[in-house]
Amino acid sequence: MISLWIPESIIPIDDGVFLEICRKNPDNRIERTKKGEILLMAPTGGETGKWNFELNYFFKIWNKNKKLGLFFDSSTAFRLPSTAIRSPDLAFISSARWTALNKWEKESFPPICPDFILELRSKTDKLTDLQSKMEEWIEGGCKLGWLLDIENLQFYIYKSEVEIQVLEGKDVILNGGDVLPDFYLSIEELLNQ
């Protein structure tokens, strides 16, 4: 990940300008932190891409049965209350919250913090950077966040106003709680796909 800091006093980068930068660079994943820092992320490697695809499958099956909301992939960026524009690897928003947005809000960077987000650590990601990003999601109103470090078999569970929970090992089963009722992700099952 490369980070650039461009002071707003030199080049104002409002949401419209940021959207245009992203549209002119469609092969890059670009985010803006709450401090105004522009982050350029490299594409994932094969292993991370494989895990991302497998994870999407589990969530798709659950949502097909529950029909409680919409899932979004890693190419979707959301505008948080802090003005940060961030992209999780996977996001969920309840149907009621999504339908409350107007057409323009849905087509740009939706000004809404997902109810659930998942970040998948790749070899190029610094754990501390991802942990800061997870805190930003929770501060923005995310109810449940999972940071999965599959290579090291460490799984970080973030909830608002609750201390971070760290689970380790292949026998971990992650629970969607009230946000994703009856959703369970078995790490062992994921690894055996």
Image (cartoon, rainbow, N blue to C red):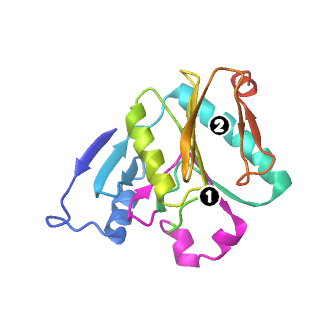
**Residue depicted at 36% across the width and 71% down the height:** 16
Residue 84 image-quadrant placement? bottom left
Point out the stretch of residues depicted in magenta: 80-109
Residue 169 image-quadrant placement? top right
Image vertical order of residue 150 relative to residue 114, above or below: above
Identity, as a three-letter code, of the amino acid under mark 1: Asp
Query: Is residue 15 shown left or right of residue 67?
Result: left
Tell me where residue 136 appears, x and y as whole percent: 44, 52
- Which disc, if any, is residue 53? 2
Decide if residue 189 is in sight here: yes
**Residue depicted at 53% across the width and 66% down the height:** 112
In front here: 18 or 148? 148
Query: Is residue 127 shown left or right of residue 4?
Result: right
Identity, as a three-letter code, of the amino acid under mark 2: Phe
Residue that numbered label 1 is attached to: 115
Image vertical order of residue 42 relative to residue 107, above or below: above
